[in-house]
Amino acid sequence: METKNIMIVGVGGQGTLLTSRILGGITIKAGFDVKLSEVHGMAQRGGSVVTFVRYGDKVNEPIVEEGQADVLIAFERLEALRYAHFLKKDGVLVVNDQRIDPMPVVIGAAKYPEGIIEELEKKYKVLKVNAMEEALKLGNSRTFNIIVLGMAAKHMDFKKEDWLEVIENTVPPKTIDINKQAFEVGYSL
Amino acid sequence: MSEKKLMLGNEAIARGAYEAGVKVSAAYPGTPSTEISENIVKYEEIYCEWSPNEKVAMEVAIGASMAGVRSLVSMKHVGVNVASDPLYTVSYIGVSGGLVLVAADDPGMYSSQNEQDSRAVARAAHIPVIEPSDSAEAKEFIKYAYDISEKYDTPVMFRTTTRIAHSQGLVELEDRCEPIDIPYTKNVAKNVMMPGNAIKRHPVVEAREKQMAIDGADFPINRIEMNDTKIGVITSGIPYQYVKEALPTASVLKLGCVNPLPKQMIIDFSKKVDKLYIIEELDPIIEEQVKSWGIECTGKEILTIQGEYSTNMLKKAILGQELQIEQKADVPVRPPILCPGCPHRSTFYTLNKLKIHAAGDIGCYTLGAVAPLSVVETTVCMGSSISTLHGMEKAKGKEYIKDWVAVIGDSTFMHTGVNSLMNMFYNQGTGTVLILDNSTTGMTGHQDHAATGKTLRGEIVPAIDLYKLCHDGIGIENTRIVNAFDTKALEAAIKEEVARDAVSVIIVQAPCALLKSNKPKPAFHIDTDKCKRCYMCMKPACPAITKADDGTVSINATMCNGCGLCEGQCKFGAILR
């Protein structure tokens, strides 16, 4: 199989590392070679963060480059826009319709762009979800990233039961049930 | 089939050390090396510790090696500078049990103040350098590094980069080998490096390096992948992975040992290919040596000494192929910021209000340089805040620094800041030092240190008391403790101490907002009826407070951790819990 390229982007603290761990787990379960690349350290402090996941028969490079992503999972709108050019022409963008103002916007030095999703829809296949709203319906705002992952999962090569099993093995024991529910919500959207 | 596991490069290094029978590990946290120790601690068989700085960690590892067991010391690239004093001399001494130093370089400066190449230090210290290109090799090569260390009686540098350290790949798990425990024997000629002994060791170092350059052709970690001979590439580390994707048909000499270079192997390889490229991130360490042997090759003429490489970059530089990609959107940057509830915000906001300049240091609080707080004006290296402020005073006089302070974190203070404070006191400086005591090493992800009362292995131990250290130990009369969120008291303390003609220390205390032990208080919200839209609450630049396009201010309840800094700014009582 040709190597598949997945990217997860968001704001430091949104849980990109947990999501990438679940992705890593499912690719191994399916018997693929896999490489993941993460960001630790200073950039994690509320900055723009990106995680790369590549899987296939044999993977060398651990990063996804511009114009190469099959699936881009964005936990925030502005981050979706920042990294959209990493998508292949027929790539899928899964975006959480949430706004988190970066510091230049907070202090009035820059403006948060309007109509991001509408713009992106002109160029790419876009699936959007207000995952925070869905997560609050479930009663746990922290599960929003698993809802987004559930939505993206439909565009990858793995069975739903396998996803649920990997989630069970990856998330903290106390949160297994709520995270599985969150995945189901995303998967059914 | 043996078990395969997805592992970070750093996790694989820890696993390799375990399998190699390592018994002692020491380190100071530093991105991208921190997770090595955080994974080693999971192996009960290995004694491991956070040392106060990299020099101490290096010496702990040297002692363990001298005593006869395998030891590991790990640090980020700039930590190698701190450890370089013992490193250069242990090169002469050699080892009893194998000794490996992991040096984690940071091309692209994801979390560092420079982009130095640790291989240059190893060359200067005449020690071998082993470099893996993914997690699987990280585990395998570290075991080989111990064999090399003991066979050639030398410390070994194991060099990684951020992309190796923080990428995950599949690693095959094996059993731990029976750890060696060589009986200690007194050997003054080898272990006491006074001139008369050292002068006899230097020729040993030279002979060792020459022998390794010959033997390197037979090291299994140096390998040739012969393919089409039009293009030949010499590479190592992560660039090897980019070469395999960009130039799948090229012949490759992949070096696992990059110092000393296997000279004859390289000469032979160069003769077999039409055009030779040297592909290495950062400095032309391999390239300059190969060129010095009269071998024609291309490297930094078409590639940079800055940042990380990639497959596309190599395709463009070597094959002239450029991928058609969509234009990058022009969007506002999202730099890292102090977290909601961070005690540093309160301190910097107070300094900003008082128009005080800060000599800064290495840690989350370096972010105090960023708008709108914009207080930190210098950052050089670990511990430098206090000494640079002292230097300013000696250059311009004590009146000049009446509107300056040094800011330094508790962990950084214990690292090397305490030396600078001793110097300021001894040489009759009058500076004001703010120790931003958040009870942890924050930026690297919450590691304990000598003043937190807990070790890497989770043991509860007596904490070094920062107040007593400064007041009773060094003898600084004007030492006091202030709560970081008590802005009135903090303001008064700073005003009083900067005016004083003597060294003073203000220990500004409040735990890091992300510490698990620090339970957040209930979130605040804004009563829009009471809010007069003066925007004073936004001055400290907390990311949990935002202004909508219509001018209304709101607090994000999931982000707010109830620190109360904004509440203190509101004159209208509009911010409520």
Image: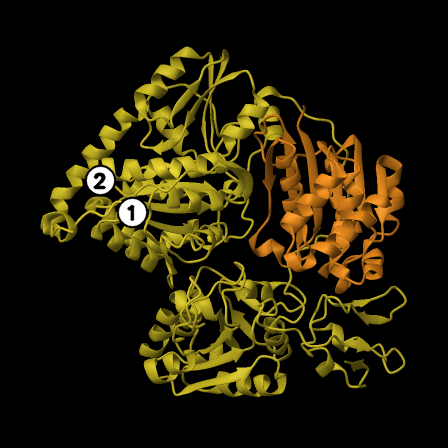
Chain colours: A orange, B yellow
Please name whichever residue, B361 or A84, is drawn nearer the observer in this view of the structure: A84
Q: Tell me which residue sits at (77%, 80%) in the image.
A: B577
Mark in the foreground, 2 or 1: 1
Q: Amino acid at mark 1?
A: Arg
Q: Same chain, marks 2 and 1? A: yes
Q: Which residue is mark 1?
A: B70
Q: Which mark is residue B474?
A: none
Q: Is residue B312 left or right of residue B469?
A: right
**Residue B484 seen:** yes
- When the figure is inspected, residue B576 is found, relative to residue A175, above or below; the finding is below
Compute the Cα span from label 2 to label 1: 12 Å
x and y percentages locating residue A110 in the rendered image: 77, 57
Tags 2 and 1 in contact by the CB under 8 Å rule?
Answer: no
Q: Is residue B301 left or right of residue B425?
A: right
Q: Amino acid at mark 2?
A: Asp
Label 1 neighbourhood size at 10 Å, few (<14), some (14-19), many (20+)? many
- When the figure is inspected, residue B272 is found, relative to residue B574, above or below; the finding is above
**Residue B294 seen:** no
In primary-sequence order, the first of circles 2 and 1 is 1
Q: Which residue is mark 2?
A: B153
Please, which chain is the residue tagged with disc 2 on? B
Q: Quadrant of the N terminus of chain A?
A: top right
Q: Quadrant of the C terminus of chain A?
A: top right
Q: Tell me which residue sits at (34%, 25%) in the image.
A: B292
Question: Is disc 2 placed on a helix, strand or loop?
Answer: loop
- When the figure is inspected, residue A24 is found, relative to residue B532, above or below; the finding is above
Please name whichever residue, B401 or A85, is drawn nearer the observer in this view of the structure: A85
x and y percentages locating residue B369 in the rendered image: 59, 64
Quadrant of the rendered structure where residue B453 is?
bottom left
Q: Tell me which residue sits at (63%, 72%) in the image.
A: B345
